[in-house]
Image (spheres, rainbow, N blue to C red):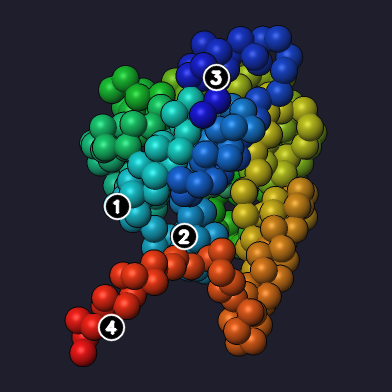
């Protein structure tokens, strides 16, 4: 347990006003949430990247509300104090404003999270406004939005030319006006992220691969520890090779079992001689 206070929205805005960067990571399970809680991470996102990092799908599209609810509950148990955001999965908000409010409400009621996140710009402004009007804090997500990866032509930088960049600037403003407390910019050029950050008034901007000038930074947990086997995105700094560490441990376990070196006496439980003798007699 830590002596941290429960993070609130006013605390986050205070940090932004003081010019202190907000720390944010993804998380999908209880033990990792416990570590992130102790590290004092401000905001934790149970991303639908869960589908790729933990469930092994090739995209985020197969992830369901039930998947997200189960994992967000586990993360909440490990981090009572971080500002916890549930990521609305594919088709949990796109069909209508009502669908969006109902599923955002499920997240809040069933997981105890503090907010939700949805992808998309002006075309999702009514969903954003509906969720916020229902009393649920919501974060927007622009730039590379993985649920639209097919329409975007793959996992690539967004907003590199002036026209597309302007659309992202406009979308960020529309989301802010719809009530988003924050907008995540994923894989947009750093100068575009800086412009949007300078223009933000009632919301703060988080960068994922979009440069240093945002109000805060997000990384995918599995990327920062070399735990995702398929690829290593350029935007992800590796802060520790946990994947290799675990693999070495697994190989050592396999060889110690094969060579009968594991378990050793301290890893098992004995039985007093008297009880053992009595057992043998009983068996006779
Ligand atoms: O699902 C997720 O983890 C996300 C990040 C890529 C921002 O939405």
Q: Is residue 202 left or right of residue 133?
A: right
Residue 144 seen: yes
Q: Secondary structure at mark 1?
A: helix
**Does 261 appear above or below 229?**
below
Q: Nearer the viewer, residue 171 or 18?
A: 18
Quadrant containing the C terminus is: bottom left
Q: Depth-wise, is mark 3 or mark 2 nearer the camera? A: 3
**Residue drawn at point x = 41 percent, y = 27 percent:** 114
Q: Are marks 4 and 2 in contact (CB under 8 Å)?
A: no
Task: Return the disc, 3 or 1, that comes first in the chain's sequence.
Answer: 3
Give the label on residue 51, or none. 2
Task: Return the disc, 4 or 1, that comes first in the chain's sequence.
Answer: 1
Q: Residue 63 at x, y = what percent?
A: 39, 58
Task: Return the disc, 3 or 2, that comes first in the chain's sequence.
Answer: 3
Give the label on residue 66, or none. 1
Q: Is residue 214 left or right of residue 55?
A: right
Task: Return the disc, 4 or 2, that comes first in the chain's sequence.
Answer: 2
Dividing the picture into quarters, in which one does residue 247 lie? bottom right
Dividing the picture into quarters, in which one does residue 72 lie? top left
CA gap between label 4 and label 2 equals: 53 Å
Give the label on residue 3, or none. 3
């Amino acid at each position: 347990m830590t002596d941290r206070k429960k993070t609130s929205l006013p605390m986050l805005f205070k940090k932004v006003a003081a010019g202190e960067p907000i720390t944010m990571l993804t998380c999908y399970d209880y033990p990792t949430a416990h570590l992130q809680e102790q590290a004092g991470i401000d905001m934790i996102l149970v991303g639908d990247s869960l589908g790729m990092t933990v469930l092994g799908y090739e995209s985020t599209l197969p992830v369901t509300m039930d998947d997200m609810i189960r994992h967000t509950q586990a993360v909440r148990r490990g981090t009572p104090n971080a500002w916890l955001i549930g990521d609305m999965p594919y088709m949990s908000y796109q069909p209508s404003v009502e669908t969006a409010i109902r599923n955002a409400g499920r997240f809040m009621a069933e997981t105890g999270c503090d907010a939700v996140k949805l992808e998309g710009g002006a075309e999702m402004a009514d969903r954003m406004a509906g969720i916020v009007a229902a009393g649920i804090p919501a974060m927007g997500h622009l730039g590379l939005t993985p649920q639209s990866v097919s329409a975007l032509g793959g996992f690539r930088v967004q907003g590199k030319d002036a026209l597309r960049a302007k659309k992202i600037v406009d979308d960020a403003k529309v989301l802010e006006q719809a009530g988003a407390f924050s907008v995540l910019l994923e894989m947009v050029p750093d100068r575009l992220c800086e412009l949007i950050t300078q223009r933000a008034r009632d919301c703060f901007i988080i960068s994922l691969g979009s440069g240093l000038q945002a109000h805060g930074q997000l990384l995918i947990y599995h990327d920062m520890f070399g735990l995702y086997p398929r690829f290593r995105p350029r935007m992800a700094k590796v802060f520790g090779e946990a994947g290799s560490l675990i693999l070495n441990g697994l190989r050592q376990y396999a060889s110690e079992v094969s060579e009968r070196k594991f378990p050793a006496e301290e890893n098992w439980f004995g039985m007093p001689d008297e009880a053992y003798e009595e057992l043998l007699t009983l068996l006779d």
